[in-house]
Amino acid sequence: MIKKKSFMAYIATVFILIISMLIAACGGPSETKKDTANNKPIEITDVTGRTVTLNKPAERVVLQWSGAGGPFFTISALMGKDTPKVIAGMDTSLQQYRADMWKHFTTEMPELAKIPEVGTVGDKNFNVEQVVALHPDVIFIPVDLKNQYESDAKQKLDEAGVQTIYIDYHAENLEKHQKSIEAIGKALGKEERAAEISKFYTDHVTKVLDRVKTINKPKPTVYLEVGMKGPEEFSNSFSGNYSWGALATLCGADVITKDIVKRSAPINPEFVLEKNPDIIMIMGSYWPKNPTSMRLGFEANEAQSQELLKAFTTERQGWSDLKAVENKDVYSIHHGLPREVYDAAVFEYLAKTFYPEEFKEVDPEATLKEFYDKFLPYSYSGIWFMHMN
Protein backbone atom coordinates (compact mmCIF):
# COMPACT_ATOMS: atom_id res chain seq x y z
CA MET A 1 0.00 0.00 0.00
CA ILE A 2 2.81 2.34 0.91
CA LYS A 3 4.64 1.51 -2.34
CA LYS A 4 1.48 2.22 -4.34
CA LYS A 5 1.07 5.66 -2.69
CA SER A 6 4.70 6.49 -3.35
CA PHE A 7 4.31 5.50 -6.99
CA MET A 8 1.19 7.66 -7.38
CA ALA A 9 2.97 10.64 -5.77
CA TYR A 10 5.86 10.14 -8.18
CA ILE A 11 3.48 10.10 -11.16
CA ALA A 12 1.76 13.31 -9.90
CA THR A 13 5.11 15.09 -9.52
CA VAL A 14 6.18 14.11 -13.03
CA PHE A 15 2.83 15.29 -14.41
CA ILE A 16 3.18 18.70 -12.71
CA LEU A 17 6.71 19.10 -14.05
CA ILE A 18 5.58 18.29 -17.60
CA ILE A 19 2.71 20.80 -17.38
CA SER A 20 5.07 23.46 -16.00
CA MET A 21 7.50 22.91 -18.85
CA LEU A 22 4.72 23.16 -21.42
CA ILE A 23 3.47 26.43 -19.91
CA ALA A 24 6.97 27.88 -19.86
CA ALA A 25 7.60 26.79 -23.46
CA CYS A 26 4.42 28.50 -24.59
CA GLY A 27 5.18 31.67 -22.67
CA GLY A 28 2.91 31.21 -19.68
CA PRO A 29 0.92 33.83 -17.81
CA SER A 30 3.78 35.30 -15.77
CA GLU A 31 6.07 35.61 -18.81
CA THR A 32 3.32 37.18 -20.91
CA LYS A 33 2.65 39.74 -18.21
CA LYS A 34 6.34 40.65 -18.08
CA ASP A 35 6.58 41.06 -21.88
CA THR A 36 3.46 43.19 -21.95
CA ALA A 37 4.84 45.50 -19.27
CA ASN A 38 8.13 45.85 -21.15
CA ASN A 39 6.45 46.54 -24.48
CA LYS A 40 3.80 48.93 -23.21
CA PRO A 41 3.89 52.13 -25.31
CA ILE A 42 5.02 55.30 -23.55
CA GLU A 43 2.66 58.23 -24.08
CA ILE A 44 4.15 61.68 -23.52
CA THR A 45 2.31 64.98 -23.58
CA ASP A 46 4.68 67.84 -24.35
CA VAL A 47 4.24 71.52 -23.47
CA THR A 48 2.27 72.21 -26.65
CA GLY A 49 -0.29 69.54 -25.76
CA ARG A 50 0.89 67.12 -28.46
CA THR A 51 0.93 63.43 -27.62
CA VAL A 52 4.10 61.58 -28.56
CA THR A 53 4.23 57.79 -28.37
CA LEU A 54 7.43 55.81 -27.94
CA ASN A 55 7.60 52.01 -28.06
CA LYS A 56 10.36 52.03 -25.44
CA PRO A 57 12.44 54.59 -23.53
CA ALA A 58 14.66 56.67 -25.79
CA GLU A 59 18.23 55.45 -25.92
CA ARG A 60 19.56 58.22 -28.17
CA VAL A 61 18.42 61.85 -28.15
CA VAL A 62 19.39 65.10 -29.84
CA LEU A 63 19.03 68.40 -28.05
CA GLN A 64 19.00 72.13 -28.73
CA TRP A 65 19.80 75.20 -26.64
CA SER A 66 22.19 73.40 -24.33
CA GLY A 67 23.45 76.74 -23.03
CA ALA A 68 20.10 77.92 -21.66
CA GLY A 69 16.49 76.85 -21.91
CA GLY A 70 17.17 73.39 -23.29
CA PRO A 71 17.12 69.87 -21.83
CA PHE A 72 20.84 69.43 -21.08
CA PHE A 73 20.65 69.92 -17.31
CA THR A 74 17.44 67.94 -17.00
CA ILE A 75 19.02 65.05 -18.90
CA SER A 76 22.12 65.32 -16.70
CA ALA A 77 19.97 65.22 -13.56
CA LEU A 78 18.03 62.22 -14.87
CA MET A 79 20.87 60.17 -16.35
CA GLY A 80 23.85 61.06 -14.15
CA LYS A 81 27.08 59.49 -15.38
CA ASP A 82 25.19 57.99 -18.34
CA THR A 83 24.45 61.44 -19.78
CA PRO A 84 27.00 61.19 -22.64
CA LYS A 85 25.65 57.75 -23.60
CA VAL A 86 22.14 59.04 -24.25
CA ILE A 87 22.98 62.32 -26.02
CA ALA A 88 23.57 61.41 -29.67
CA GLY A 89 24.06 65.01 -30.81
CA MET A 90 23.74 68.57 -29.55
CA ASP A 91 24.23 72.23 -30.39
CA THR A 92 27.27 74.24 -29.30
CA SER A 93 25.67 77.01 -27.21
CA LEU A 94 26.87 75.52 -23.92
CA GLN A 95 30.49 75.58 -25.04
CA GLN A 96 30.13 78.93 -26.83
CA TYR A 97 28.23 80.98 -24.25
CA ARG A 98 28.91 79.08 -21.00
CA ALA A 99 32.56 78.27 -21.63
CA ASP A 100 33.43 77.87 -17.95
CA MET A 101 30.55 75.44 -17.46
CA TRP A 102 31.54 73.41 -20.50
CA LYS A 103 35.17 73.26 -19.34
CA HIS A 104 34.11 72.18 -15.84
CA PHE A 105 31.68 69.52 -17.06
CA THR A 106 33.99 68.07 -19.72
CA THR A 107 36.88 67.95 -17.25
CA GLU A 108 34.77 65.82 -14.93
CA MET A 109 33.05 63.91 -17.76
CA PRO A 110 35.36 63.90 -20.83
CA GLU A 111 32.91 61.85 -22.90
CA LEU A 112 30.71 64.96 -23.25
CA ALA A 113 33.32 66.54 -25.53
CA LYS A 114 32.97 63.61 -27.96
CA ILE A 115 29.26 64.20 -28.60
CA PRO A 116 28.72 65.20 -32.26
CA GLU A 117 27.77 68.81 -32.98
CA VAL A 118 24.60 69.20 -35.06
CA GLY A 119 24.21 72.99 -35.21
CA THR A 120 21.33 75.11 -33.99
CA VAL A 121 17.84 75.57 -35.39
CA GLY A 122 17.44 79.22 -36.33
CA ASP A 123 21.16 79.81 -36.90
CA LYS A 124 20.96 78.24 -40.37
CA ASN A 125 23.63 75.69 -39.43
CA PHE A 126 21.32 72.93 -38.18
CA ASN A 127 22.39 69.78 -40.02
CA VAL A 128 19.25 67.71 -40.57
CA GLU A 129 21.07 65.04 -42.55
CA GLN A 130 23.59 64.57 -39.76
CA VAL A 131 20.81 64.27 -37.18
CA VAL A 132 19.11 61.59 -39.28
CA ALA A 133 22.44 59.74 -39.66
CA LEU A 134 22.85 59.67 -35.86
CA HIS A 135 19.62 57.61 -35.60
CA PRO A 136 18.16 59.32 -32.54
CA ASP A 137 14.85 58.24 -31.07
CA VAL A 138 13.89 61.76 -29.97
CA ILE A 139 14.84 65.37 -30.53
CA PHE A 140 14.00 67.89 -27.79
CA ILE A 141 13.08 71.32 -29.17
CA PRO A 142 12.55 74.44 -27.02
CA VAL A 143 9.15 75.84 -27.98
CA ASP A 144 10.74 79.18 -28.95
CA LEU A 145 12.31 77.35 -31.90
CA LYS A 146 9.09 75.59 -32.92
CA ASN A 147 8.15 77.68 -35.96
CA GLN A 148 11.64 77.70 -37.43
CA TYR A 149 12.13 74.01 -36.70
CA GLU A 150 8.86 73.02 -38.33
CA SER A 151 9.72 75.14 -41.36
CA ASP A 152 13.27 73.84 -41.77
CA ALA A 153 13.58 70.36 -40.36
CA LYS A 154 10.63 68.60 -38.77
CA GLN A 155 9.22 66.90 -41.86
CA LYS A 156 12.52 65.21 -42.70
CA LEU A 157 12.94 64.03 -39.12
CA ASP A 158 9.36 62.77 -39.03
CA GLU A 159 10.04 60.76 -42.17
CA ALA A 160 13.17 59.33 -40.56
CA GLY A 161 11.14 58.20 -37.53
CA VAL A 162 12.63 60.75 -35.12
CA GLN A 163 10.05 61.88 -32.57
CA THR A 164 9.87 65.57 -31.63
CA ILE A 165 9.17 66.64 -28.04
CA TYR A 166 8.71 70.35 -27.32
CA ILE A 167 9.82 71.75 -23.96
CA ASP A 168 9.68 75.24 -22.45
CA TYR A 169 11.88 76.55 -19.67
CA HIS A 170 12.10 80.04 -21.16
CA ALA A 171 8.63 81.18 -20.13
CA GLU A 172 9.56 80.82 -16.44
CA ASN A 173 6.15 79.29 -15.87
CA LEU A 174 5.92 76.68 -13.10
CA GLU A 175 3.52 74.42 -14.97
CA LYS A 176 5.66 74.49 -18.13
CA HIS A 177 8.76 73.64 -16.10
CA GLN A 178 6.88 70.71 -14.57
CA LYS A 179 5.61 69.49 -17.95
CA SER A 180 9.08 69.76 -19.47
CA ILE A 181 10.68 67.75 -16.65
CA GLU A 182 7.93 65.14 -16.88
CA ALA A 183 8.17 64.84 -20.67
CA ILE A 184 11.95 64.42 -20.67
CA GLY A 185 11.73 61.95 -17.77
CA LYS A 186 9.09 59.83 -19.50
CA ALA A 187 10.99 59.83 -22.77
CA LEU A 188 14.11 58.52 -21.04
CA GLY A 189 12.26 56.00 -18.88
CA LYS A 190 13.13 57.93 -15.70
CA GLU A 191 9.69 58.90 -14.42
CA GLU A 192 10.44 58.39 -10.72
CA ARG A 193 13.63 60.43 -10.91
CA ALA A 194 11.79 63.14 -12.85
CA ALA A 195 9.11 63.26 -10.14
CA GLU A 196 11.81 63.80 -7.49
CA ILE A 197 13.36 66.64 -9.49
CA SER A 198 9.98 68.22 -10.15
CA LYS A 199 9.04 68.03 -6.47
CA PHE A 200 12.31 69.69 -5.42
CA TYR A 201 11.75 72.47 -7.93
CA THR A 202 8.05 72.91 -7.18
CA ASP A 203 8.49 72.98 -3.40
CA HIS A 204 11.11 75.73 -3.54
CA VAL A 205 9.37 77.87 -6.15
CA THR A 206 5.93 77.55 -4.57
CA LYS A 207 7.24 78.72 -1.19
CA VAL A 208 8.62 81.85 -2.85
CA LEU A 209 5.53 82.63 -4.90
CA ASP A 210 3.13 81.99 -2.02
CA ARG A 211 5.07 84.31 0.27
CA VAL A 212 5.37 87.05 -2.37
CA LYS A 213 1.56 87.06 -2.65
CA THR A 214 1.24 87.93 1.03
CA ILE A 215 3.56 90.96 0.89
CA ASN A 216 1.65 94.21 1.08
CA LYS A 217 4.13 96.95 0.27
CA PRO A 218 5.20 98.92 -2.83
CA LYS A 219 7.08 96.84 -5.38
CA PRO A 220 10.72 97.83 -5.88
CA THR A 221 11.54 99.15 -9.35
CA VAL A 222 14.24 97.02 -10.96
CA TYR A 223 16.52 97.32 -13.98
CA LEU A 224 17.89 94.05 -15.40
CA GLU A 225 20.65 93.81 -18.01
CA VAL A 226 22.90 91.09 -19.39
CA GLY A 227 26.46 92.23 -18.71
CA MET A 228 27.96 90.58 -21.80
CA LYS A 229 29.20 93.78 -23.46
CA GLY A 230 30.61 95.42 -20.36
CA PRO A 231 29.95 99.01 -19.23
CA GLU A 232 30.84 100.41 -22.67
CA GLU A 233 27.69 99.19 -24.41
CA PHE A 234 24.19 98.42 -23.20
CA SER A 235 23.22 94.79 -23.72
CA ASN A 236 19.80 93.13 -23.53
CA SER A 237 17.10 94.06 -21.06
CA PHE A 238 13.77 92.24 -20.78
CA SER A 239 10.02 92.53 -20.99
CA GLY A 240 7.96 91.61 -17.96
CA ASN A 241 6.94 88.21 -19.31
CA TYR A 242 10.17 86.78 -20.70
CA SER A 243 13.27 85.25 -19.14
CA TRP A 244 14.76 87.50 -16.43
CA GLY A 245 11.86 89.93 -16.73
CA ALA A 246 9.33 87.17 -16.10
CA LEU A 247 11.30 85.87 -13.14
CA ALA A 248 11.63 89.28 -11.53
CA THR A 249 7.94 90.03 -12.07
CA LEU A 250 6.91 86.74 -10.46
CA CYS A 251 9.16 87.52 -7.50
CA GLY A 252 7.47 90.85 -6.83
CA ALA A 253 9.47 93.41 -8.81
CA ASP A 254 8.28 96.26 -11.00
CA VAL A 255 10.55 95.75 -14.04
CA ILE A 256 11.15 99.20 -15.52
CA THR A 257 11.57 97.85 -19.08
CA LYS A 258 8.40 95.75 -18.99
CA ASP A 259 6.52 97.93 -21.48
CA ILE A 260 9.31 99.09 -23.79
CA VAL A 261 11.01 95.78 -24.64
CA LYS A 262 9.10 93.16 -26.61
CA ARG A 263 11.14 90.21 -25.32
CA SER A 264 14.81 91.05 -24.93
CA ALA A 265 16.71 93.98 -26.42
CA PRO A 266 19.04 96.84 -25.43
CA ILE A 267 17.41 100.10 -24.35
CA ASN A 268 18.25 103.79 -24.61
CA PRO A 269 20.72 104.61 -21.79
CA GLU A 270 18.71 107.72 -20.91
CA PHE A 271 15.78 105.53 -19.93
CA VAL A 272 17.58 104.11 -16.88
CA LEU A 273 18.51 107.61 -15.71
CA GLU A 274 14.92 108.75 -16.17
CA LYS A 275 13.44 105.80 -14.25
CA ASN A 276 16.10 105.83 -11.50
CA PRO A 277 15.37 102.27 -10.32
CA ASP A 278 15.55 101.03 -6.73
CA ILE A 279 17.61 97.98 -7.71
CA ILE A 280 20.02 97.24 -10.57
CA MET A 281 20.92 93.70 -11.59
CA ILE A 282 23.71 93.01 -14.09
CA MET A 283 23.82 89.37 -15.22
CA GLY A 284 27.22 87.71 -15.45
CA SER A 285 28.67 84.65 -17.11
CA TYR A 286 32.00 83.86 -18.81
CA TRP A 287 32.49 85.79 -22.03
CA PRO A 288 36.30 85.83 -22.47
CA LYS A 289 36.19 87.72 -25.78
CA ASN A 290 35.13 90.81 -23.81
CA PRO A 291 37.40 91.33 -20.79
CA THR A 292 35.07 93.97 -19.29
CA SER A 293 31.99 91.75 -19.34
CA MET A 294 30.50 90.77 -16.00
CA ARG A 295 32.02 87.48 -14.87
CA LEU A 296 30.46 84.86 -12.62
CA GLY A 297 30.51 81.09 -12.62
CA PHE A 298 33.01 78.30 -12.05
CA GLU A 299 36.08 80.40 -12.86
CA ALA A 300 35.02 83.67 -11.24
CA ASN A 301 37.25 85.45 -8.75
CA GLU A 302 35.50 87.42 -6.00
CA ALA A 303 37.75 90.48 -6.13
CA GLN A 304 37.82 90.64 -9.92
CA SER A 305 34.06 90.18 -10.24
CA GLN A 306 33.44 92.91 -7.67
CA GLU A 307 35.58 95.28 -9.74
CA LEU A 308 33.80 94.35 -12.94
CA LEU A 309 30.40 94.95 -11.35
CA LYS A 310 31.51 98.24 -9.84
CA ALA A 311 32.71 99.44 -13.27
CA PHE A 312 29.13 99.48 -14.54
CA THR A 313 28.27 102.04 -11.86
CA THR A 314 31.36 104.23 -12.27
CA GLU A 315 31.96 104.21 -16.02
CA ARG A 316 28.42 104.79 -17.26
CA GLN A 317 27.40 108.41 -17.40
CA GLY A 318 25.01 109.38 -14.61
CA TRP A 319 24.94 106.00 -12.91
CA SER A 320 26.86 107.14 -9.84
CA ASP A 321 23.88 109.35 -8.99
CA LEU A 322 21.27 106.60 -9.29
CA LYS A 323 19.65 105.69 -5.98
CA ALA A 324 20.36 101.97 -6.53
CA VAL A 325 24.07 102.81 -6.70
CA GLU A 326 23.97 105.26 -3.80
CA ASN A 327 22.16 102.67 -1.66
CA LYS A 328 24.43 99.84 -2.84
CA ASP A 329 21.50 97.92 -4.26
CA VAL A 330 23.48 96.59 -7.23
CA TYR A 331 23.60 92.84 -7.78
CA SER A 332 24.69 90.18 -10.23
CA ILE A 333 23.44 86.65 -10.97
CA HIS A 334 24.85 84.12 -13.39
CA HIS A 335 23.07 84.38 -16.72
CA GLY A 336 23.04 80.60 -17.10
CA LEU A 337 20.93 79.95 -14.00
CA PRO A 338 17.43 80.88 -15.19
CA ARG A 339 15.49 79.00 -17.87
CA GLU A 340 16.76 75.78 -16.34
CA VAL A 341 15.62 72.91 -14.16
CA TYR A 342 17.48 74.36 -11.14
CA ASP A 343 16.38 77.99 -11.36
CA ALA A 344 14.38 77.65 -8.12
CA ALA A 345 17.54 79.14 -6.59
CA VAL A 346 17.07 82.20 -8.80
CA PHE A 347 13.50 82.67 -7.55
CA GLU A 348 14.89 82.64 -4.02
CA TYR A 349 17.70 85.09 -4.77
CA LEU A 350 15.44 87.57 -6.55
CA ALA A 351 12.76 87.45 -3.85
CA LYS A 352 15.37 87.88 -1.12
CA THR A 353 16.91 90.83 -3.00
CA PHE A 354 13.54 92.53 -3.47
CA TYR A 355 12.22 91.72 0.03
CA PRO A 356 15.20 91.00 2.32
CA GLU A 357 13.20 90.97 5.57
CA GLU A 358 10.50 88.65 4.28
CA PHE A 359 13.09 86.16 2.95
CA LYS A 360 15.93 86.63 5.45
CA GLU A 361 16.17 82.92 6.31
CA VAL A 362 16.28 81.79 2.67
CA ASP A 363 19.67 80.66 1.34
CA PRO A 364 19.65 80.57 -2.49
CA GLU A 365 23.22 79.34 -2.81
CA ALA A 366 22.49 76.44 -0.46
CA THR A 367 19.53 75.53 -2.67
CA LEU A 368 21.68 75.55 -5.82
CA LYS A 369 24.37 73.47 -4.13
CA GLU A 370 21.76 71.02 -2.85
CA PHE A 371 20.45 70.54 -6.38
CA TYR A 372 23.96 69.82 -7.65
CA ASP A 373 24.64 67.40 -4.80
CA LYS A 374 21.31 65.58 -5.10
CA PHE A 375 20.83 65.40 -8.82
CA LEU A 376 23.73 66.47 -11.03
CA PRO A 377 26.79 64.37 -11.88
CA TYR A 378 29.03 67.46 -11.70
CA SER A 379 30.62 69.06 -8.64
CA TYR A 380 29.54 72.46 -7.33
CA SER A 381 31.96 75.39 -7.02
CA GLY A 382 32.35 78.98 -8.19
CA ILE A 383 30.44 82.24 -7.70
CA TRP A 384 26.84 82.45 -8.94
CA PHE A 385 25.37 85.38 -6.98
CA MET A 386 26.94 88.70 -6.05
CA HIS A 387 26.02 91.86 -4.14
CA MET A 388 28.26 94.83 -4.92
CA ASN A 389 30.31 95.90 -1.91
Image (tube, rainbow, N blue to C red):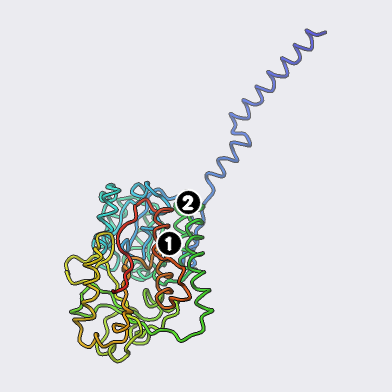
- Tell me: 89 left or right of 355: left
Residue type, numbered disc 2: Lys
In the image, is 48 to the left or to the right of 228? right
Question: Looking at the picture, does residue 104 appear above or below residue 144?
Answer: above
Mark 2 closeness class: few <14, some 14–19, many ≥20 residues within 10 Å: some
Q: Identify the residue at the far right of this view.
A: 1
Front of the two marks 2 and 1: 1
In the depicted view, which residue is nearer to us: 289 or 173?
289
Tell me if label 2 and label 1 are in contact, CB under 8 Å.
no
The first of marks 2 and 1 along the sequence is: 2
Q: From this viewpoint, is residue 127 visible?
A: no
Q: Residue at x 47, y 53 (%)?
A: 54
The quarter in which the C terminus is drawn is bottom left
Give whichever of 131, 245 is nearer the camera: 245
Which quadrant of the figure contains the N terminus?
top right
Helix, strand or loop at label 2? It is loop
How far apart marks 2 and 1 lie (CA) works out to 23 Å
Residue 10: image tag = none
The residue type indicated by label 1 comes to: Thr
Other-residue count near label 1 (Cα within 10 Å), few / some / many at <14 / 14–19 / ≥20: many
Could you say where residue 78 lies in the image, as x and y percent from the top left?
A: 43, 52
Q: Is residue 376 above or below residue 153?
A: above
Q: Position of residue 97 (x, y in %)?
A: 25, 64
* Viewer-nearest residue: 27 or 4: 4
Q: Residue at x 60, y 31 (%)?
A: 26
Relative to 154, 114 lies left or right: left
Using the image, tell me which numbered label, if any, was put on residue 190.
2
Question: Going by the picture, which residue comes out furthest to the bottom?
Answer: 274
Number of numbered callouts drawn: 2
* Picture coordinates of residue 134, whole percent (x, y): 31, 50
Q: Which residue is mark 1?
A: 367
Q: Is residue 253 visible?
A: yes
